[in-house]
Amino acid sequence: MKIRVGFGFDVHQLKDKHPFVVGGVTLDHHKGAFGHSDADVLLHAICDALLGAANLRDIGFHFKNTDDRWKGISSMILLKETVKLLAEKNWQVGNIDAMLCLEAPKINPHISAMQENIANAIGISTEDISIKATTNETMGFIGREEGVVAYAVCLIEKT
């Protein structure tokens, strides 16, 4: 059996009165992530981890932020498309471990819904998806609520 690991990172600017979508869940907050798509920082980091593990470049290569096809699109669609790219190369997702770094809002109440969304998009169990969150202890652009960061690692297996 052949396995690989991948690492993903994403960052998005936060703007007042903008939707804040994380893990396919719209959070109730006065600020939200800004980007070409729905700016779901968690899903973007996961996509990059998966693509990297399969040696398929990165999310920007496949879903360019200059392409109007992806303007305002749900990142759940990007995740599903990423999984299709892996399947074309005979890879399947083993597990995902992700970390969000932001000051607010609290993520813990939404983790189960995020896991469900991601599991349904990928076709794996919620037991294979770990999502954690931390703050930046009020330091830097994260601490000032100017941005949000996500990290993800994954394991993929050759089918």
Image (tube, rainbow, N blue to C red):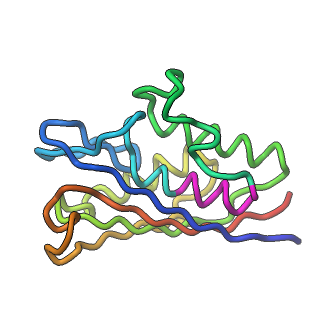
Residue ID at (13%, 63%): 144
Residue ID at (42%, 66%): 131
Q: Nearer the viewer, residue 4 or 66?
A: 66
- In the rendered image, residue 63 lying in the magenta stretch gets the answer no
Where's the N terminus, which quadrant? bottom right
Residue ID at (28%, 41%): 26
Q: Quadrant of residue 4?
A: bottom right
- Residue 118 locus on image (x, y percent): 51, 50
Residue ID at (70%, 63%): 53
155 is higher (above) or lower (below) than 13: below
**Which contiguous range is marked in magenta?**
46-55
Where's the C terminus, which quadrant? bottom right
127 is higher (above) or lower (below) than 23: below
Q: Residue furthest top?
A: 68
Q: Residue furthest front?
A: 66
- Residue 46 locus on image (x, y percent): 53, 56
Q: Residue furthest bottom?
A: 137
Main SS of the magenta part reads helix
